[in-house]
Structure formats: structure tokens, C-alpha cells
Amino acid sequence: MWPSFLHHLSLHFPIVLSMGLAAAATYGLRRDDPELLRPLVRWGGWANLAMTSLAVVSGLVAGGFSGGSEDLSHHRYLGITAFFVIALAATSYDYGQRHNLVDWRRFGGLLWWVATFAVIGTGHWGGLAEHRAVVPW
């Protein structure tokens, strides 16, 4: 019961933060305003990776590494993919910030958009797996 409870507590933070980081990274690169947005995206990315790690580990412990419905399998594999994309986004943006490399920050910002779509898809499949009876479509 605890892993499932922890999974449900920790999964909403990465969804919202990925969207915010994608928007902030894009705005920061377009405006080239490093004073506020660069550290925000850098440390927000590490916070997002930490919460995503907690959500993935608790979800795998609660739901198992295999089995379940087809929706749950999609949710599991897309969640693992989202974890790796978030890890790559946080790492690449941090590398670009530490070494003042704009191309790495751009790559990290682009990956935050990929992460946003990955967590939205993960949430969609997770919602279908959990609430199929009440979802009207």
C-alpha cells in the first residue's frame, strides 16, 4: 500500500514542473535573460528528476515490473521513458549552464518539451489503467 500511496503523491509534481521548465527554458533562450531563468531551469530540473525518480521507483514497486493490463504496460514503459528523458534534460541543461554552452542549454530546453509530452502521455495511460470505468472515452 505504501508504494502505491507514495506513487500517487509524487507523480503530479513532475507533470506540472516539466511544462513549466519547458516554457521557462524556451523563454530564457529566446530572450537570453540568464539572471533568473537559467538557475531556475537548472535547479528545477534536478528537483524534477528527484521527484520523477521517486514516482518511477514507487510505481514499479507498487505495480510490478511486468504484467497488468495493456494500459498499465503503456503507462509503465512511457513512464520509464519519461524518466530517462527528464534525466537527460536535467543533465544537459546543467552542463550547458556550468560551462556556458548555449547549444547544450538549447538541447536541454528542447528535451524539456519532449519530457512534457512524455509525462502527459504517461498520465493518460495511467489514468486509463486506473479509471477506465469512469472515463467517458
Image (cartoon, grey):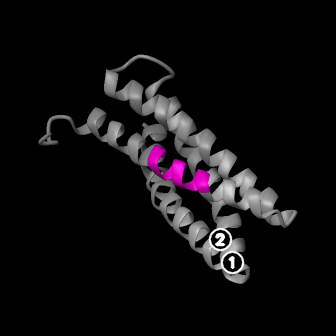
- At which x and y percent is residue 66? 47, 18
Give residue 32's mark: 1
Q: Tell me if residue 35 comes above or below residue 76 in the rendering.
A: below
- At which x and y percent is residue 61? 52, 30
Closest to the observer: 113 or 60? Answer: 113
The image quadrant where one finds the N terminus is: top left
Question: How far apart, in angstroms, are the residues tagged by discs 2 and 1?
Answer: 5 Å
Q: Are marks 2 and 1 in contact (CB under 8 Å)?
A: yes
Q: Mark 1 Cα within 10 Å, few/some/many (few <14, many 20+)?
A: few
The image quadrant where one finds the C terminus is: top left
- At which x and y percent is residue 18? 52, 58
Visible residue check, residue 62: no
Residue 115 sits inside the magenta stretch: yes
Relative side of 123 to 47, left or right:
left
| Residue stretch in magenta | 110-118
Q: Tell me if residue 119 comes above or below residue 44 in the rendering.
A: above
Q: Mark 2 Cα within 10 Å, few/some/many (few <14, many 20+)?
A: some
Give residue 57's mark: none
Secondary structure character of the magenta stretch overall? helix
Residue found 53% across the figure and 48% down from its top:
114
Q: Say which quarter of the image contains residue 94.
A: bottom right
- At which x and y percent is residue 56? 54, 39
